[in-house]
Amino acid sequence: MFNNLFFAFTKKELIGFKNYVDKLEIGYWEHKYACSNLRRKIPIPTSQENLVIMLNRQEVIELQTLLAFKNASIKAYETLNADDIDYECHLN
């Protein structure tokens, strides 16, 4: 889902980003942009003024799962199988 995003965080920045993502009010943003034709309605601002990462509900939940670790320890995640990945693959 996030194959086109690259995050390079220090430990402090990673924890700050995790805290921000954990506190996102998904319902608020979906309601705010309910009348827009945007497919992704939940914004995550960046330090670059003209760049905002837009996600949908499922992507936010996946990002929260990806960032679900306790402080500095990284939890072991379940192995994914092909059915768990919702991605269009185009073979050339």
Image (cartoon, helix red, strand yellow):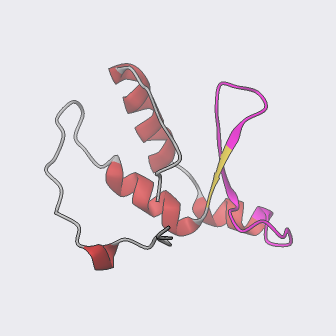
Q: In this view, does 90 lie to the left or right of 76?
A: right
Q: Position of residue 74 (x, y in %)?
A: 18, 40
Residue furthest left as drawn: 76
Q: How many labels does the image show?
A: 0
Q: Which of 10 and 90 is in front in this view?
A: 90
Q: Is residue 28 left or right of residue 59?
A: right
Q: Where is residue 54 in the image (x, y as percent from the top left)?
A: 66, 52
Q: Nearer the viewer, residue 37 or 28?
A: 37
Check residue 36 for magenta coloring.
yes
Q: Tell me which corner region of the image, top left, top right, bottom left or bottom right, holds residue 65.
A: bottom left
Q: Where is residue 42 in the image (x, y as percent from the top left)?
A: 65, 56
Q: Is residue 5 left or right of residue 85?
A: right
Check residue 46 for magenta coloring.
yes
Seen at 44% across and 73% down, the residue is 86
Q: Position of residue 63 (x, y in %)?
A: 43, 53
Seen at 74% across and 68% down, the residue is 31
Q: What's the magenta region? A: 32-52
Q: In this view, does 77 lie to the left or right of 60?
A: left
Seen at 60% across and 64% down, the residue is 56
Above or below residue 37? Residue 6 is: above
Above or below residue 75? Residue 71 is: above
Residue furthest bottom as drawn: 83
Above or below residue 20? Residue 59 is: below
Magenta stretch, overall SS: loop
Seen at 47% across and 52% down, the residue is 2
Q: Tell me which corner region of the image, top left, top right, bottom left or bottom right, holds residue 16.
A: top left
